[in-house]
Image (tube, rainbow, N blue to C red):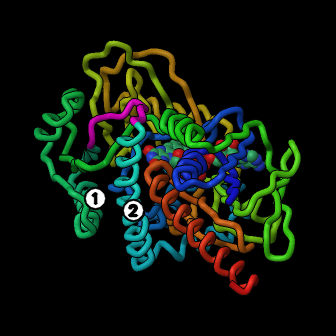
Amino acid sequence: MRIVVLGAGVIGATTAYALAADGHDVVVLDRQPAAGLETSFANGGLVTPATSDSWAAPGTPAKILKWLGKDDAPMLLRLSAVPGMLRWGLSFLANCRPAPWRANTRATLALALDSLAELRRIVALEQLSYDRNPPGLLKIFRSKGSMESALRAAALYEELGVRVERLDAGTAVAREPALAPIAGRLSGAVFYPDDESGDAFKFTQAIAAVAAARGAQFRYGQTIHRLAIEGERITAVETGGGPVKGDLFVLALGSYSPRLARTIGLSLPIYPAKGYSITVDTPGWNGAPRIPVADDELKAAVTPLGERLRVAGTVEFAGYDTSLDARRGRMLEDNLAAILPDHPKGPVRHWSGLRPLTPGGRPIVARLGPRNLLVNAGHGPLGWTLAAGSARRVAELAENYRDRGQDSRRAREGR
Ligand SMILES: Cc1cc2nc3c(=O)[nH]c(=O)nc-3n(C[C@H](O)[C@H](O)[C@H](O)COP(=O)(O)OP(=O)(O)OC[C@H]3O[C@@H](n4cnc5c(N)ncnc54)[C@H](O)[C@@H]3O)c2cc1C
């Protein structure tokens, strides 16, 4: 069966690997010259089941209102974006109620845990290297109040099988000595020993390479314009380089998935939630952290990546605009200085990306619309975290599709 995967971000590349490993004939299309060059390029680098709680949470609407129009807010809604996101926004608000929040968080966490196990299996099997850190994520707190509310989320994680260690400030600094300069400002920390981290872009490139070694064809520089459909089936993807035919199609275009889906009348509830990161070099710095540190108050995480530090954070609802706002970039520089005041000073590389966010935070991994379309999109702030598990689910859906296809062929042929 020939399967055409649309998109070579972390989701498309990991999906291509899973499908090629199952023996399918796989073609991957992407407009960029290589894998992982859009939202998967410079993200926070966390594989973090312990951050599965949906952004659509009971306290979020009040925060968004409080921060409205404030350029330095961690979560910023640009008023100009509102008309284009009304339907999505109402659904987001509906998901902020306690019951949907718990259900969304549970579902995302279950997928994240499956995904973590699958990622570890693939990394060991294929010997992938991507500046992977020792396991663990340290979430630090600067006030008693914020620690207490985070402990309530931690309790839900624990209930669902995630290991959680509550630490006082001294133990947190012993766990990550790079925090010594700010020890006096910490009220405590929570350590999640099973989270992982590394460079998501290097991972994407590495998994694309092993997928290619298993026979997947990656065709870059191919802009996808529309899907050609006959009856209930997609027959081809129309690209700048001509039509690409296949038996089954996997839509993995991240934030751009709804745009293509619209060409066949399919509506996908995915909205781009812009985020920023900065990357600084730290060659030879002995004081560098060994594991990522997420600062609850600053809503930012610092992740070591080889001889670099990545700081990622901030959310902005501003449509498909990826331009860099200097003020929001500076916020991340200030955050880095507030977490690791002694970090080596040097050039800072700024980046922004569009998280493909669904109202409840759960990705869409399902067969939708035409009979031969699988969707693997909408992974929001957790694309790398959920990639391997989502790819496995797509591979299972492809397997079922093949079985059903063979059954109906046999029925038609009277066998
Ligand atoms: C600041 C920030 C920090 C983040 N931190 C983390 C983190 O720590 N951990 C985590 O798990 N996740 C994190 N994320 C989220 C994660 O990066 C995304 O969920 C993930 O990258 C989405 O992957 P994707 O493959 O769906 O999309 P993308 O990586 O955007 O891939 C989509 C691909 O489709 C291609 N494409 C789009 N349209 C077309 C077209 N018309 N024709 C041809 N090709 C097309 C693009 O070129 C692209 O390669 C973060 C995101 C941001 C912005």
Q: Report the front residue among 238 and 410.
A: 410
Q: Earlier in the sequence, mark 2 or mark 1?
A: 2
The residue beneath circle 2 is 53
What percent of the width, then of the height, locates residue 182? 23, 32
- Residue kind at label 2, given as amino acid type: Asp
Q: Please say whether residue 81 is one of the residues in the magenta stretch.
A: no
**Residue 194 versus residue 52 in the image, above or below:** above
Mark 1 lies on a secondary structure that is: helix
| Circle 2 Cα neighbour tier, 10 Å, few/some/many (<14 / 14–19 / ≥20) | many
Q: Residue furthest top?
A: 284
Query: Which residue occupies 52% across, 50% down?
Result: 21
In three-dimensional space, the C-alpha distance between marks 2 and 1, rounded to whole angstroms, equals: 11 Å
Res 183 quadrant in image = top left
| Label 2 vs label 1, nearer the camera | 2
Q: Which residues are magenta?
A: 127-135
The quarter of the picture where the C terminus appears is bottom right
Q: Report the front residue among 280 and 50.
A: 50
Disc 2, disc 1: CB below 8 Å? no
**Residue 180 versus residue 190 in the image, above or below:** above
The residue beneath circle 1 is 150
In the rendered structure, the answer to whether residue 210 lies left or right of residue 218 reads left
Query: Which residue occupies 79% across, 66% down?
Result: 234
Residue labelled 2 has its Cβ within 8 Å of some atom of ligand 1: no
- Residue kind at label 1, given as amino acid type: Ala
